[in-house]
Amino acid sequence: MTPTDAPPDPQTHTQDRLLDGRLTLAQPAKGYRAGLDAALLAAACDAPEGARVIEAGCGAGGALLAAAFRRPNVRFTGVERNAGAAALARHNARANGLADRVEILEADIASPFSRLGLAPFDAAISNPPFFDDPATLRAPHPAKREAWMADDGIAAWTGFLSKSVREGGSLTIVHQAERLADLLALLAPKCGSFQVRPIHPHADAPAKRVLVRAVKTGKAPLRLLPPLVLHPRDGAKHTDEAEAILRGRSGLDWL
């Protein structure tokens, strides 16, 4: 057994249960850990039966494997530049019985999609790093830097995603609400038919996240969808809608 094939060290990794305990995810105890953004991205993946889906920057597989669990007749490919995270994603795919439908490639999205030697996909999903200017980010834990900082800029991510799907294919991105204008501007040369779903922490608070859906060569007008509100003010952890999504009982629909 090679080091990259070895199971995660329980001293440095945790075993977390997702989708109401139906999916197990081994991930580092410190550093970047899949959370709400990954859960929302997986819930927003609505690829039809027989489709092929790619995730740019899959990490340990939090969003990728949750999406694969939700879409049992869809094939998934994750792209991850960090060798340790890619190995962990492969382990997680095997541990959840998804290795026959989930492939993990060790590659950098800063390189052209064509170098992967793959046919364009039907859909792409991604949770790109939120920051591309080191001056705007306080020094994070070293293990989080790759997940938080887009060294080649957010344009590298949108460019890779646009190239990775066929004409008529969809791109779904979760990102900070304040970067919405940047995302739309960067995707617009190749994509259209935008749909935007704001994600609000509370009903009376501004959105902090957005889910953006685009279609390559799409021509339909932009649609602003009803928001998802995560937390009520009455002390409950999540709203009923958010709780159902996080537990895998429902998804996030698109028009």
Image (cartoon, rainbow, N blue to C red):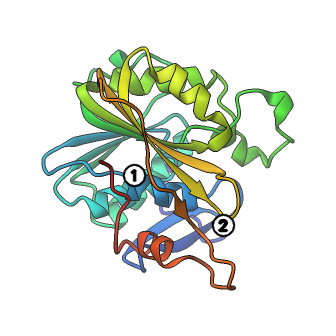
Query: Residue 219 appears in which quarter of the rendering?
Result: top left
Residue visible at 41% across and 28% down in the picture: 161
Q: Secondary structure at mark 2?
A: loop
Query: Residue 119 appears in which quarter of the rendering?
Result: top left
Quadrant containing the N terminus in the rendered view: bottom left
State the residue lying farthest toward the left.
50
Q: Which one is nearer the viewer's eye here, 24 or 158?
A: 158
Q: Is residue 184 visible?
A: yes
Q: Which one is nearer the viewer's eye here, 87 or 74?
A: 74
User: Is residue 16 positioned above or below 75 on the image?
Assistant: below
User: Is residue 117 positioned above or below 196 on the image?
Assistant: above
Residue 64 disc label? 1
Total numbered labels placed on residues in the image:
2
Residue named by callout 2: 202
Q: What's under tag 2, amino acid-wise?
A: His
Residue 205 disc label? none
Residue visible at 44% across and 23% down in the picture: 160
Query: Can you give x and y, in whole percent of width and height, for residue 241 in the image?
Result: 46, 73
The crowd level at tag 2 (other Cα within 10 Å; few <14, some 14-19, many 20+) is: some
The crowd level at tag 1 (other Cα within 10 Å; few <14, some 14-19, many 20+) is: many
Query: Residue 237 appears in which quarter of the rendering?
Result: bottom right
